[in-house]
Image: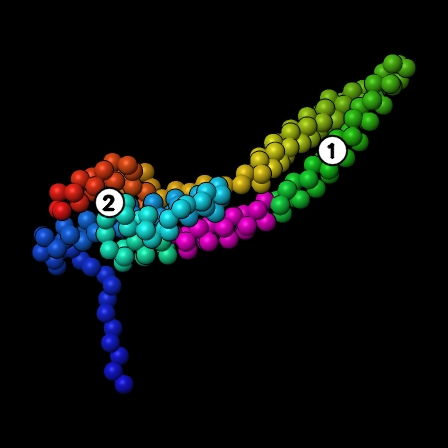
Amino acid sequence: MKVFSMSQRIYYKDLEPDAESIIKKDLELYNCMLHKAFKICFDRAYKGVTYSETDQRMIKSFYGTSDYFPLSAIYEAKALVKSLKCREKENQDMIKTCLKKINKKIKKNEKQLKKALKEKEKLINRSKKNKYTEEDYLYEVQVLDPNIKRLKSIIRNLKFRRNRNEFKLKRKMPSVCFGGKKNLKNDYLDIYRYDASIFIGQAKHLEFDLIRNQSH
């Protein structure tokens, strides 16, 4: 049985300059569509935005292309949003587990702090009754006071972590980043498109609108 295989990797060095330019422009145009399609799907999923037209018609009319690129961008954007929701649920479960551990540690350290403060109070009462010895002083200064200070610092840091995680848990919309600042700054659009979804700013939209209008 014969099996047909074909590599999906393209080496620009093996292409003609015109073909290389066309492929790069197509990749850039597709990424513009992907970003717009993702924004539409994201707003619908997390902000409750409704549209009078279908996603396909909006993308197609905005960029003035055939159905192939818009449909591909829409399907990929929907998959990204679905993946984002799954990831969001996993993060929430992790945060809830982390909060349980933090609350447990806070309770444990507060119990130890309460015990240390009671010992401190006993030593204060002993000093008021003139029963305060040198051993009591050394124990208070070298052991008890540093331990109280350490426990208060631990509890304060744990409460800060708890507040931060509770804030993350209340946040409904997850953060999204298309690509990276370094690649975006250097315009490596054809390189990292397949490593991460790419964000293309309004300048790129205007550039493609100008190119498309000149070609018609």
Q: What element carries label 2?
A: loop
Work out whether residue 206 or residue 2 is closer to the camera in this orientation and state it.
Answer: 206
Tell me where residue 182 sits by quadrant.
top left
Give the colouring mode of the picture.
rainbow
Tell me where residue 6 sits by quadrant.
bottom left
Inspect the image, locate mark 1, and give the three-letter code of the amino acid beneath it. Answer: Glu
Name the residue rendered at 16%, 42% in the picture. 213
- The residue that label 2 is drawn on is 188
- The residue that label 1 is drawn on is 110
Let me know if residue 37 appears in the view. Answer: yes
Q: Mark 1, residues whose alpha carbon is within 10 Å: few (<14), some, or many (≥20)? A: some
Image: 41 above or below 114: below
Circles 1 and 2, Cβ within 8 Å, touching? The answer is no
Quadrant of the drawing holding the N terminus: bottom left
Name the residue rendered at 87%, 18% in the picture. 125
Let me know if residue 194 appears in the view. Answer: no
Q: Where is residue 111 in the image (x, y as percent from the top left)?
A: 77, 35
Q: Mark 2, residues whose alpha carbon is within 10 Å: few (<14), some, or many (≥20)? A: few
Name the residue rendered at 23%, 66% in the picture. 7
Q: Where is residue 56 in the image (x, y as percent from the top left)?
A: 33, 53
What is the span of residues highlighted in magenta in the rendered image?
77-95
Q: Where is residue 105 in the image (x, y as percent from the top left)?
A: 69, 40
Q: How far apart are marks 1 and 2 (CA)?
A: 53 Å
